[in-house]
């Protein structure tokens, strides 16, 4: 911690715990103390720490061929592209590395489509985004953030974005009246804002409105996707088919025109992100017009194939569904009546506890320190909200044990306040 403080940029405020090892749901610090990981690296480690199949793919490919750049073909990218497009039912995929890069890719793709296909005059394309959004940290993305921590002091800002309130269909309808609107970029559940779950019909109504106005609806499923909320995608309907394409009940599926994935696409062992779209959109970008040295590299492609296979073979989205209900019901039973707790919300294993204090208070942070001491790692999102998002491999017994520990921490905290 001292070395990081002295030699590292101070762009994070980590919880004071130094982790050395992980396996499944558990992580261990340098002194050998074990913790339940209830953050999963912001939902990147859905398949659990050190999953042998995913780590095996990483090691195997690293020893075989790590990087070729896209100047040449590599033997892993094609099979990965086939697997992911089949999984989510799109014509094409474009592989990148970080989530922010995938969002940037989606923005460029949307603009290019706007000029080449929709016929919006040059440099006039507009993208609608939501208040309290979180899509990453690049200079373009922070240009449309409503969080001063993200944007303040980083101007001048990229034009061409309009922010409307989240979960507000009339506001979207109004914004869509402008014929220069090319796209609507939205998180199906706002993770960083504090696990804000919109009304049940918000996403499907928004998707239908976009379709009616010839506007691309772009789903940022970087945090919500890959099983986190109990389905392959949070935008899946609740048909339960677990294919990622809502085969049983397609009308409940708000299929995005541009789907953005990251984080758990690699099980958290390597940065892999991806943008999926059909040919009419994806093929507007031609050779030389977008790319990345590492995007779609052999290790990334092999690791992502393994990470997707693990999700499917271990039916982790089903476990996320069941353990999510256990978490919300179990926690409500144990701490729901405490004055400290204002609410418990979420979907699947993306959940949050709302703390009864101001967003500026240190209560959520202090609780996270007390949870750490009890062997549970979680982090406040904004001020008075704590997110709980364990790896999706968590068992019923592990969840029960974690809930019991949380009950003790919250109850003791309330008594000593
Ligand atoms: C919804 C969403 N979009 C984009 C990002 C950015 O991803 P990355 O940190 O990999 O750039 C995040 C990261 O938390 C996210 O939650």
Image (cartoon, rainbow, N blue to C red):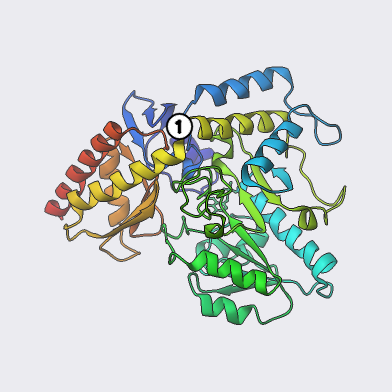
- The residue sitting at 54% across, 79% down in the picture is 171
Residue assigned mark 1: 48
Q: Return the residue nearer the eye: 148 or 246.
A: 246
Q: Quadrant of residue 327?
A: top left
Q: Return the residue nearer the eye: 63 or 264.
A: 264
- Whether residue 153 sits left or right of residue 353 in the image: it is right
Question: x%, y% of residue 228?
Answer: 46, 45
Does ligand 1 reach within 8 Å of label 1's beta carbon?
A: no
- The residue sitting at 27% across, 42% down in the picture is 371
Give the crowd class for mark 1: few <14, some 14-19, many >=20 residues within 10 Å. many
Is residue 147 among what the camera can see?
no
- Whether residue 416 sits left or right of residue 159 in the image: it is left
Q: Is mark 1 on a helix, strand or loop?
A: loop
- The residue sitting at 30% across, 66% down in the picture is 358
Query: Which quadrant does the N terminus fall into?
Result: top left
- Residue at the extreme left: 415
Query: Which quadrant does the C terminus fall into?
Result: bottom left
Question: x%, y% of residue 74?
Answer: 79, 29
Q: In this view, does 49 lie above or below 172?
A: above
Q: In which quarter of the image is residue 253?
A: bottom right
- Whether residue 365 sits left or right of residue 401 in the image: it is right
Question: x%, y% of residue 25?
Answer: 39, 32
């Amino acid at each position: 911690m001292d070395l990081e403080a002295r030699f590292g940029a101070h762009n994070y405020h980590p919880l004071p715990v130094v982790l050395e090892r992980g396996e499944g749901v558990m992580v261990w610090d340098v002194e050998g103390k074990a913790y339940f990981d209830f953050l999963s690296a912001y939902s990147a480690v859905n398949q659990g720490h050190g999953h042998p199949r995913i780590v095996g793919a990483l090691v195997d490919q690293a020893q075989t061929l790590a990087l070729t750049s896209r100047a040449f073909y590599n033997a892993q990218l094609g099979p990965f592209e086939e697997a992911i497009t089949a999984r989510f039912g799109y014509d094409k995929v474009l592989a990148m590395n970080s989530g922010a890069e995938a969002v940037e890719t989606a923005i460029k793709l949307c603009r290019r489509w706007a000029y080449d296909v929709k016929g919006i005059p040059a440099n006039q394309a507009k993208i609608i985004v939501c208040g309290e959004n979180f899509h990453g940290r690049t200079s373009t993305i922070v240009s449309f953030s409503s969080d001063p921590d993200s944007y303040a002091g980083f101007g001048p800002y990229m034009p061409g974005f309009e922010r409307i309130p989240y979960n507000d269909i009339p506001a979207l309808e109004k914004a869509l009246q402008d014929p220069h609107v090319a796209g609507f970029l939205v998180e199906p559940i706002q993770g960083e804002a504090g696990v804000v779950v919109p009304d049940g019909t918000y996403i499907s109504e928004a998707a239908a409105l976009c379709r009616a106005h010839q506007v691309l609806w772009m789903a940022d499923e970087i945090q919500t996707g890959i099983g986190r909320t109990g389905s392959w995608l949070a935008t899946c309907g609740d048909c339960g088919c677990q294919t990622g394409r809502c085969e049983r009940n397609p009308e409940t599926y708000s299929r995005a025109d541009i789907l953005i994935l990251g984080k758990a696409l690699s099980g958290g062992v390597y940065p892999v992100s991806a943008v999926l779209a059909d040919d009419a959109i994806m093929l507007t970008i031609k050779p030389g017009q977008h790319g990345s040295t590492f995007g779609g590299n052999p290790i990334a492609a092999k690791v992502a194939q393994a990470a997707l296979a693990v999700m499917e073979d271990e039916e982790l989205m089903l476990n996320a569904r069941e353990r999510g209900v256990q978490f919300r019901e179990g926690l409500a039973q144990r701490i729901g009546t405490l004055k400290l707790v204002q609410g418990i919300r979420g979907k699947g294993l993306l959940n949050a506890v709302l703390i009864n204090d101001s967003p500026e208070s240190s209560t959520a942070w202090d609780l996270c320190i007390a949870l750490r001491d009890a062997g549970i790692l979680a982090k406040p999102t904004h001020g008075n909200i704590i997110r709980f998002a364990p790896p999706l491999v968590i068992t019923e017994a592990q969840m029960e044990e974690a809930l019991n520990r949380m009950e003790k921490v919250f109850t003791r905290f309330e008594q000593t306040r």
